[in-house]
Amino acid sequence: MKDLYTLIPLVFSGLLCIGLIFLLWQKTTRDLQFKQELIELSSLFIGISGFLALFIMLYLLIIVMGLKKSRKTGMDGLDQLIQKMNYFREIVELLVQSKIWLPGLKEYIDVEFAGLTFFQVKEFYKGKSKLAIEFLQEKNNFADTENLYLELKSLLLTDPKQKQLPESVVAPSFYKKELVKKWLEHKCGSGLWYYFGYKYGTYKDALDLEAVFERHQEKIMLLANSIDTKVFEDSSFNEVFLSKLGEYATKELIPKLYQLQKQTSKKIPTSTRYLYLLFLLLVFFGVLLPLTFLLLKFSIVILIIGYAFVISLVFFISTTFFRFITQLLESK
C-alpha cells in the first residue's frame, strides 16, 4: 500500500507528461504564433524552475547541517561512553581473572567447552551451536555460576563472532555496533545484579568475594568512580556494589552506547534523497534544457519536453507531498 501511494501519482504524472508533449507539439505545428509564445515564456519558465530548485537546495543544506550537528553532538557523548565502557570492562576483566569462582570452573569452561560463548548459549534455540546444547544438558557442581562466568567473558569480546578471549583484553576506541547490539539483546551485565543482588543468598557460597585481592578491590572502586562518581561515590567492594554496577551497565551504559552509536551512524533519510532527485530533475529539465535551446537554437521539441516534464513534476510533487511529509516525520 505504501508503494501504491507513490506508484499511482507516478503513473499519472508520466501520462500527463506524454499528453502535454503531444498536445504542445500539435499546437506548435498548427499555430506558429503559439511557438513564439512558448519561446517568450522560456525566461519565466527558467526563473520559476530555478527558484524551486534553489528552495529545495537550501532546504537540503539545512537538513544536512542539522544531521551533521546531531552527529557531532552524538560523537562527543559517544567518546565519553566508550571510555566508561572501557572502565567497566576493566572491572569485568579483574573479576573474570580473580579467584571468586569455584575450583575447576574456569577449566571447565575454558578447556572442556573452549570456543563456547554466552551468545551461543542464549541463542541455543536457533540450533547453530551443538556445543551450546551440550553445555545446557550438562550437570555440574558449579551452582549455575558458569553462566555468570560466560556472561562476563562476553563483555570482554571485541567481536560478536569471536570465540576466544585474547591474551590481553584491549580497550577499543570504538565498539562494533553488532557487538553492542548483542550485549543489549541478551542483557549482558544483568548477571551481576542477579547473582550478587536478587539471588545472592543462593549463590554466596559459590562466589567468594574475599578471594579478590585487596589491591584489585581498590582498583575496581577507582574505576567505578571514574564511570559515575554520583552513583558509586559512597560504595565499597561488596555484593551490593556489584549488583548496582550490573544494574547500571544494563540500564544506563550499554543502552546509551547503542543509541549514540546508532545516532552517529545514521544515514541520510530516504526523504532527503527524494528531494535531491527532484532538485536534479528541476535543474536539468527546467533550467539547463531551456537554456540549451535558447543558446544553441535547437528544435522547439527540446523546449516542449522541458515544459511538459516540469509541469508533470510539479503535479507529482503536489500529489505525493503528504506522503513525503509523513516519511520526513518518521525519519526523525
Image (tube, rainbow, N blue to C red):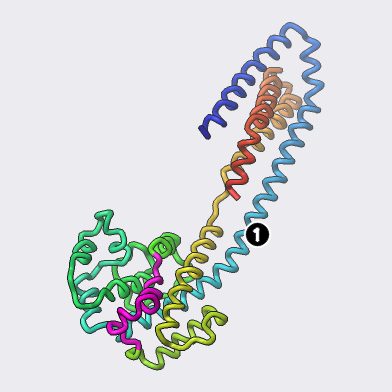
Q: Residue reaching furthest bottom?
A: 214
Residue matched to label 1: 69
Left or right of 165? Residue 300 is right
Query: In the image, what residue occupies the spot 30% across and 86% down?
Result: 99
Vertical arrangement, residue 322 with respect to residue 85, above or below? above
Helix, strand or loop at disc 1? helix
How far across and how far down the image is residue 253, in percent?
49, 70
Q: Is most of the magenta stretch helix, strand or loop?
A: helix
Residue 114, image quadrant:
bottom left
Residue shown at the point (55%, 72%) measured from the top left: 80
48 on left or right of 317? right
**Which residues are the magenta region?**
187-209
Across and down, in percent, residue 297 comes to: 73, 21
58 vs 14, left or right, is right
Q: Quick one: 26 or 209, which is closer to the camera?
A: 209
Q: Is residue 24 magenta?
A: no
- The image shows a total of numbered marks equal to 1
Instruction: Tell me where residue 63 appears, x and y as whole percent.
Output: 66, 50
Rendered position, 172 above or below 59: below
Residue nearer the viewer, 176 or 22: 176
Which residue sits furthest top? Answer: 30
